[in-house]
Amino acid sequence: MSLKVEQLTLRFGGLTALNNVSLGAEQRELVAIVGPNGAGKTALLNCINGVYRPCTGSIRLDESDLTTIPVDRIALAGVGRVFQHAELFPHMTVTENLLVGRHLLMHTGIFSGALYFGRARRDEREARKAVERIIDFVELYRYRDVPAANLPYGVQKLVGVARALALDPKLLLLDEPSTGLMREEKENFARFLLRMRHELNMAILWVEHDMQMVTDLADRIVVLNYGEVIADGAPEDVRQLPKVIEAYIGSGERALAPAN
């Protein structure tokens, strides 16, 4: 599995959100995308999963150019997305929310689905098995039958991740998944993040503001500033670059400064 973003440019009228952005990610690689507010981090994820269409450039996931295929086929190409807010269906249970995430992999026709026989029955049986495996993986068993609206905030965030995993993605996009989590919840999420990388054989692009987590967990850091890549490398190298420190200090954020 290989993701290659090459010379990606995105404009909204006279505003350039991304300017000739190039980066990549390989199987089992955890790549953190960081930068000051407004740097273009979420815009980049939105281009990769088809929310935005870039003006120029290409986004290749294996042999597929994601900028040329229909938006509704990007998920089937192997792209899973976790948004900053969980965006769950509040009246559905955890299991039902995960089944929604799985539905693209089901091939039931209208007739067999309505009568629930043959392939429809087999598809649902296999989907429920897959969902149960994910529930076990992220340790959500005690919540499987609880409506999403009744879940603690940290658990809702985890269900959002689990729903993306239900699609069996080759590439997982995480948009600030630790926002609003308490320290213990962040530590728990970090544990699952490492397990996803090592056990599920996927590449992960991870937009994050918690630089301690990024430094501890990421294989590489890509730094965006005003829509441009200003650094790409190992965490211990990137955080010490003067241009990276300047970008953060200039925005009032000092999180990338080397630890004492």
Image (cartoon, helix red, strand yellow):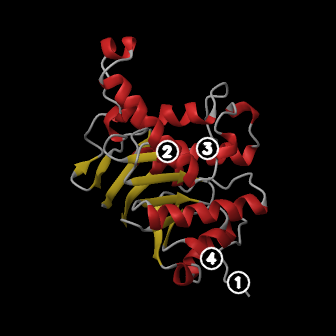
Gap between marks 1 and 4 measured at Cα:
12 Å
Q: Earlier in the sequence, mark 3 or mark 2?
A: 3
Mark 4 or 3, closer to the camera: 3
Q: Is residue 215 above or below residue 9?
A: below
Gap between marks 2 and 4 measured at Cα:
33 Å
Mark 2 or 4, closer to the camera: 2
Q: Which mark is residue 204?
A: none
Q: Position of residue 12 (x, y in %)?
A: 45, 40
Mark 3 element type: helix
Q: Which residue is mark 4?
A: 245
Mark 2 element type: helix
Q: Which mark is residue 164?
A: 2
Specify the farthest residue to the left.
63
Name which residue type carries label 2: Ala
Q: Earlier in the sequence, mark 2 or mark 4?
A: 2
Q: Which residue is mark 3?
A: 159
Name which residue type carries label 3: Val
Image marks 1 and 3: residues in contact by CB distance under 8 Å: no
Q: Position of residue 17 (x, y in %)?
A: 48, 49
Q: Which residue is mark 1?
A: 259
Image marks 3 and 2: residues in contact by CB distance under 8 Å: no
Specify the farthest residue to the bottom.
260
Mark 1 or 2, closer to the camera: 2
